[in-house]
């Protein structure tokens, strides 16, 4: 996971149309897509809306020039959580359906309902599409750019300060972690080597975690002392310069928002049903 953190920043340093966009534009597009998809009621309409949103995501991903394997690797990280979240839904009834039909009967009186499977499938589709837009956002904008963009979007300054400190020293912790793991490799220690006694591996892993804890504590004390020397206090905030949006950013933003808003409305709205109702009274 620490190695993925450094790889994430390397991907965001690429040059493409999506990378060059203002981070505020990408944040708004990502949030708008998630809110629009979540707002669609749980019905088969979700499949159509999700398919069109995923096509929009694919177009943006292609424009970013990032290899597909990067998306697949990050998707596999979240898949266990998504399947765990949606998999349990098939055993329970929910408030979106009134009638339930048993699809499968398992031992100990456990039943799998057809409507619950449909609900779990819709929930999984929503999860995958929303997560895809989050992957696109994190892969095309650095953490510092996202932090500054959130500040320009009038996020609470206290939250910006806390996130800024966390982002800054997360990489410091990652560097310390790399040094410790490199030291273990130089000593030919592998915690997954079954040729070593199990107790020996556990003891050394405990020493490593203790060393990381002590180093992070010492680093935190040094950081806090240096911040006090620089005038840090209760009313200290991160300074973020004003940055106007360019015309190209605004055009791209409104184009994507037009698609994101229009697609759910058009898919949910049935003009033929309304026409029949108007003609036949």
Image (cartoon, helix red, strand yellow):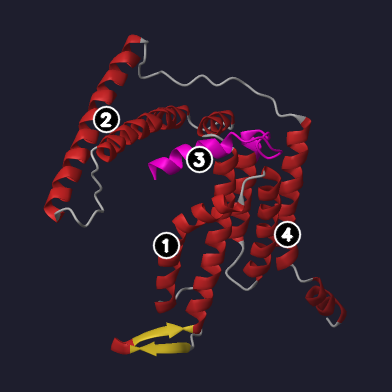
Q: Earlier in the sequence, mark 3 or mark 2?
A: 3
Left or right: where 267 falls relative to 145: right
Mark 4 element type: helix
Residue 167: x and y in percent read 43, 32
Q: Quadrant of the C terminus?
A: bottom right
Q: Earlier in the sequence, mark 3 or mark 4?
A: 3
Q: Are marks 4 and 2 in contact (CB under 8 Å)?
A: no
The residue pinned by badge 3 equals: 8
Foreground label between 4 and 1: 1
Q: Earlier in the sequence, mark 4 or mark 2?
A: 2
Q: Earlier in the sequence, mark 1 or mark 3?
A: 3
Q: CA distance from mark 3 to mark 2?
A: 22 Å
Give 106 or 139, whichever is nearer the viewer.
139
Q: CA distance from mark 4 to mark 2?
A: 48 Å
Q: Are marks 3 and 4 in contact (CB under 8 Å)?
A: no
The residue pinned by badge 1 equals: 80
The residue pinned by badge 4 equals: 263
Mark 3 element type: helix
The residue pinned by badge 2 equals: 216
Residue 163: x and y in percent read 43, 32
């Amino acid at each position: 996971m620490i190695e993925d953190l450094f790889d994430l920043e390397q991907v965001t340093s690429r040059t493409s149309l999506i990378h060059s966009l203002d981070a505020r534009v990408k944040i708004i597009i990502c949030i708008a897509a998630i809110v629009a998809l979540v707002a669609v009621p749980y019905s088969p309409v979700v499949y159509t809306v999700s398919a069109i949103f995923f096509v929009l995501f694919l177009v943006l991903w292609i424009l970013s020039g990032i290899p597909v394997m990067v998306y697949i690797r990050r998707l596999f990280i979240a898949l266990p959580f998504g399947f765990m979240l949606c998999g349990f839904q098939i055993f329970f009834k929910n408030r979106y359906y009134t009638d339930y039909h048993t699809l499968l009967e398992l031992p100990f009186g456990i039943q799998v309902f057809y409507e619950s499977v449909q609900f779990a499938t819709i929930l999984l589709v929503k999860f995958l599409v929303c997560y895809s837009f989050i992957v696109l956002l994190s892969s095309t904008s650095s953490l510092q750019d996202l932090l500054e963009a959130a500040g320009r979007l009038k996020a609470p300054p206290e939250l910006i300060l806390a996130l800024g400190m966390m982002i800054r020293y997360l990489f410091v912790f990652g560097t310390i972690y790399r040094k410790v793991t490199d030291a273990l490799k130089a000593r030919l220690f592998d915690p997954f080597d079954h040729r070593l006694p199990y107790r020996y591996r556990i003891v050394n892993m405990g020493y490593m975690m203790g060393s990381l804890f002590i180093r992070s504590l010492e680093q935190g004390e040094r950081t806090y002392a240096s911040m006090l020397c620089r005038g840090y206090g209760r009313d200290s905030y991160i300074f973020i310069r004003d940055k106007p949006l360019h015309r190209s950013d605004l055009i791209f933003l409104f184009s994507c928002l037009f698609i994101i808003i229009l697609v759910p409305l058009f898919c949910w709205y049935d003009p033929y049903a309304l026409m029949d109702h108007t003609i036949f009274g």
